[in-house]
């Protein structure tokens, strides 16, 4: 892994100290200084508000980064998939929460095995899921923390809030450790106005409170409500119900999150993830860079050009098309920096991060980090 | 590569003969019988029309598949990126055309080195590109076929048709082998009506003919015009100008291409690429599968559910949301097959193909093939 991470197939190996100009394009680049400021600001926010921080590692898929977050005070990380958990555990991450449902018996056997190697927790939202999890854990002789997922307004996974008590009872009756409620409202994250996001989280808080009451009414203690994303965490932190924040994107701040009106009281997060591209073709009124949507995900819209005032248009899988705006078009061979529309699926396209310190202009390569859980969708 | 291809991290190895039901989800699955029928039909079409066939391997990124296409009569394959060419060459593909511009001197040194190992061709659309290519080849003592790219209507790379003669002259004056014209019209491929696509290709044919005349007026022979995609190749084949077809997606036929009104005279291509997913959560009126846009690209729209009449809605990076239509919702743990909206970037998300023979229902695993050039964006 480390070899392929450091050396693109056929390409030049990147060595610490290489200038930014030597980074081959297209490349996934971290501005380390900006990332560390983001990391520290979120850690400080959580500390100040008495919240546990368990950042979502589905965003960065990197054991190196997960361990940096934990060194700064995070209690562990979240992932969405078992194979992500396995990859991060293999990279030395000691506390992982699979904030999603796992149903297949083969995968649950792997969950149970993984629980023998790291501190593991998982979400459930069905009787079948609880039964199969209990069976796999009993066979392996291991244990996990179990969160009951509540639909906090997203309409995806999770039980209705009032049904949380019954499912928590099943968790307990199967001899499993009930650890609390998973209540993440994904749809709230990108509502552009802070007021809209606050209203959506008011709904999530009500759902979480209803679920919590249903659990305690069943005679079961509810130790924790966990959830929140980069768009809303200030509201969950202020709710009095949530005890743990799962935000992940704050670390890299993609274009889509930066397009949100800031939440009052939120730390300022800077763009820290970029695609370095190069102009490979020049027309009279447009330039073409070597980065298309195989280099940056466009599910949340196109990237924004960074450091230059240029318009970016979709040029397909392998190309981006630039048109002049405040700045003139770059020349053939020039570098163009892009801020991805959505960091999570953009990271998942790449095998490695080129980590730059000293800034994108004039800085140098600090390290190359593998994207350990790239492609871990299972 | 072969180990990681055969064995997902932590997951069950797939062994030939395993039933389809044993394939872990989400998985990128080829219906081998359908793919082979598509492959044979396109090879037969090209033969029948006296056209060279050079399928675009940016779509499948597989040396195994490229060699199957060449065994069936293809003269070689196209790619978009140098690193793709290197990966396929390493997998034993002997004839590769980089149908795109390469500008960076380091990459052109690798182009020149690769030309010493395989039959290589490349596109140019600038004086700088020609000069740098010539310099790299002179230093390495190797040679490539050089195609001048013409803007055939897409407005991306390529010179204006009338400028093709001057650039061909530069190719020749630098001692390079001028091999013909690259004239691909990407925007024509997904115009829904066959008449619209035909009209767009009429424009491309005019552009190619103008460029051809400009080249011959410069006293240079123009041996070949190459281009065409799965949406339009019947029109390029009928043009009398194009001599080589670059279509790639015919092999897998994604949802977006299947949504086109068929071109008159085109072979019938079947869906041969699927995402196998599993239901991991069930609400009263919806089900959630474990495949989101980290498993299938959505740049050309959402996947279509296969074998069942269900509506698919975007559930984010890791989830798909199903709603009933003609069929009732599947149960927790049920398999759901998806036809991706766009095959190229979907393939690029996965490290391996699980290749099934005997059909998706009742068939078995024939092989696991690596996606050799996955992530090769440089």
Image (spheres, coloured by chain):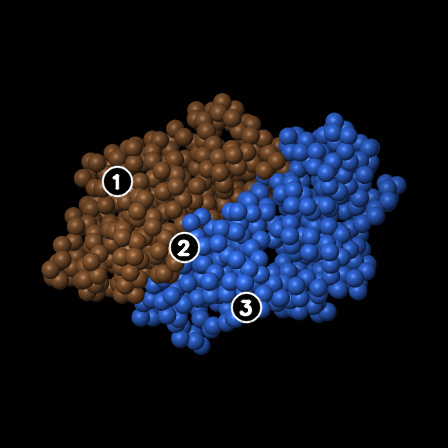
Chain colours: A brown, B blue
Most foreground residue, B362 or B141: B362
> Residue A183: image x %, image y %?
26, 54
Mark 2 highlights which residue? B318
Q: For the C terminus of chain B, which image quadrant?
A: top right
Q: Give the labeled residue for mark 1.
A: A75
Q: Chain of mark 2?
A: B
Numbered disc 1: secondary structure: loop
Q: Which mark is residue B363?
A: 3
Q: Is residue A105 left or right of residue B173?
A: left
Vertical order, B368 against B88 (above or below):
below
Same chain for the residues under marks 2 and 3 in the image: yes
Q: Residues within 10 Å of mark 3 (few under 14, many from 20)?
A: some
Name the residue at the right extreme: B219
- Residue A43 drawn at (x, y percent): 27, 35
Q: Nearer the viewer, residue A332 or A17?
A: A17
Q: Nearer the viewer, mark 2 or mark 3?
A: 3
Same subunit, tags 1 and 2? no
Which comes before the other along the chain, label 2 or label 3?
2
Labels 3 & 1 near each other (Cβ < 8 A): no
């Amino acid at each position: 892994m480390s070899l392929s991470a450091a050396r693109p197939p056929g390409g030049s190996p990147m060595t610490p100290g290489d200038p930014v100009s030597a980074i081959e394009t297209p490349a996934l680049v971290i501005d380390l200084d900006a990332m560390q400021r983001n990391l520290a600001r979120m850690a400080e926010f959580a500390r100040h508000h008495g919240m546990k921080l368990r950042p979502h590692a589905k965003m960065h898929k990197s054991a190196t980064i997960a361990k940096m977050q934990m060194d700064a005070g995070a209690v562990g990380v979240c992932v969405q998939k078992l194979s992500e958990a396995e990859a991060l555990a293999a990279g030395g991450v000691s506390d992982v929460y699979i904030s999603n449902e796992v149903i297949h018996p083969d995968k649950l056997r792997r969950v149970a095995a993984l629980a023998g190697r790291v501190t593991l927790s998982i979400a459930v939202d069905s009787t079948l899921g609880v039964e199969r999890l209990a069976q796999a854990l009993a066979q392996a002789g291991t244990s996990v923390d179990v969160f009951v997922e509540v639909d906090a307004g997203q309409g995806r996974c999770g039980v209705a809030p009032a049904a949380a008590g019954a499912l928590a009872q099943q968790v307990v009756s199967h001899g499993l450790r009930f650890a609390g409620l998973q209540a993440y409202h994904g749809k709230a994250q990108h509502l552009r106005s802070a007021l809209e996001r606050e209203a959506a989280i008011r709904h999530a808080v009500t759902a979480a409170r209803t679920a919590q009451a249903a659990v305690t009414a069943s005679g079961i203690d509810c130790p924790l409500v966990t959830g929140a994303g980069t768009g809303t965490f200030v509201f969950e932190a202020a709710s009095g119900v949530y005890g743990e924040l799962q935000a992940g994107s704050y670390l890299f701040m993609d274009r889509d999150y930066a397009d949100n009106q800031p939440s009052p009281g939120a730390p300022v997060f800077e763009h820290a993830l970029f695609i370095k591209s190069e102009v490979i073709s020049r027309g009279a009124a447009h330039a073409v860079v070597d980065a298309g949507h195989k280099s940056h995900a466009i599910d949340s819209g196109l990237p924004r050009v960074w450091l230059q005032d240029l318009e970016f248009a979709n040029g397909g899988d392998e190309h981006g098309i630039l048109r002049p705006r405040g700045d003139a078009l770059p020349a053939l061979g020039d570098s163009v920096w892009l801020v991805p529309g959505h960091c999570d699926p953009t990271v998942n396209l790449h095998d490695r991060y080129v980590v730059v310190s000293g800034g994108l202009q004039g800085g140098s390569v600090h390290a190359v980090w593998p994207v350990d859980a790239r492609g871990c969708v299972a």
